[in-house]
Amino acid sequence: MNGHEIAKAKAAATYNTAADYFDHPVSSFWHCFGRQTIERMALRPGDSVLDVCSGSGGSALPAAEQVGSQGKVIAADLAERLIALAKAKAEVKKLDNIEFRVADMLDLGYPDGSFDAVVCVFGIFFVPDMADAVKELWRMVKPGGRLAITTWGPDLFEPANSAFWDAIGSARPDLQRSFNPWDRISKPAGLRELFAEAGIYADDILAESGMHALNSPNDWWAIAMGSGYRGTLAQLDVETFERVRNANLSCLHREQVTSINTNVVYAIATKR
């Protein structure tokens, strides 16, 4: 398999495994930032929207509500279990203007200029060549349409993130990670540079600082279980898993951690 296929398989496996915790109430930020991305786009009734890396519908469902019955939303994700969650929520909300696809965002097969808006929230960094991915998403935007990419800002989930990787490093040094895939685009300049590499001028970039409250360290563990950290945790045997969990939570107890960083960068480009 090439680099993209390997990354694709890894992301699908990780988030299918994490689906059981993905919509846990303590992880409400997924849907908060998805909704804020859609609000920033100011979609119009009747618009056509493509939402990739759509997860359990954090941005696709608000988009479907905003474009109304005359509009259309396509929600695509590699993880079929997340798509199933999103589909169930759409049925409860009686949204019949949304179509769900278990598919790769780089292989959707839509013609040039198919959508008024293309959206990717917390997903562009799963692709080894992010500039190529941005180009492909831009290709599907109509003239006058917009591309929105939302990514994590610096110091994501700190101080819990560092405590997690310290615990992993002590138990399984071979699994320790020294960087995050979104580090390169965690500031407006990096995200603007990514768009420029794809030949696009991003005219609207906003960095937003935020904190997410934890009622207890156990809240953090639920977040880890429902996110990309699950891919690492899934490689641990039962004994090591418990050792990592206890070390991670003990550190948060000791440091009296009651909140974690959730900094975000929003970017929107308009096809002139």
Image (tube, rainbow, N blue to C red):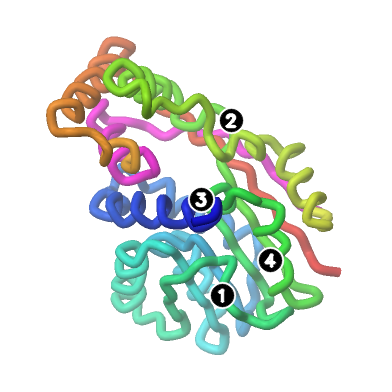
- The label nearer to you, 2 versus 4, is 4
Q: Amino acid at mark 2?
A: Pro
Q: Is residue 215 visible?
A: yes
The kind of residue on which mark 3 rests is Phe
Specify the label residue 33 is tagged with. 3
Question: Circle 4 is placed at which residue position?
Answer: 136
The extreme bottom residue here reads 70
Q: CA distance from mark 3 to mark 4?
A: 23 Å
Rendered image quadrant of residue 220: top left
**Number of dots carrying numbers:** 4
Find the magenta span and give its range: 203-229
Which residue: 59% across, 75% down? 49
Q: CA distance from mark 3 to mark 1?
A: 24 Å
The numbered mark at residue 154 is 2
Label 4, label 1: how many angstroms apart (C-alpha)? Answer: 10 Å
> Which label's residue is closer to the chain start, 2 or 1?
1
Q: Secondary structure at mark 1?
A: loop
Q: Earlier in the sequence, mark 3 or mark 4?
A: 3
Does 215 lie within the magenta span? yes
Residue 99: image location, x then y, percent? 45, 80
- Is there a contact, CB below 8 Å, between mark 4 and mark 1? no
Whether residue 211 is situated above or below residue 147 in the rendered picture:
above
The verdict on residue 68 being magenta is no
SS assignment at label 4: helix
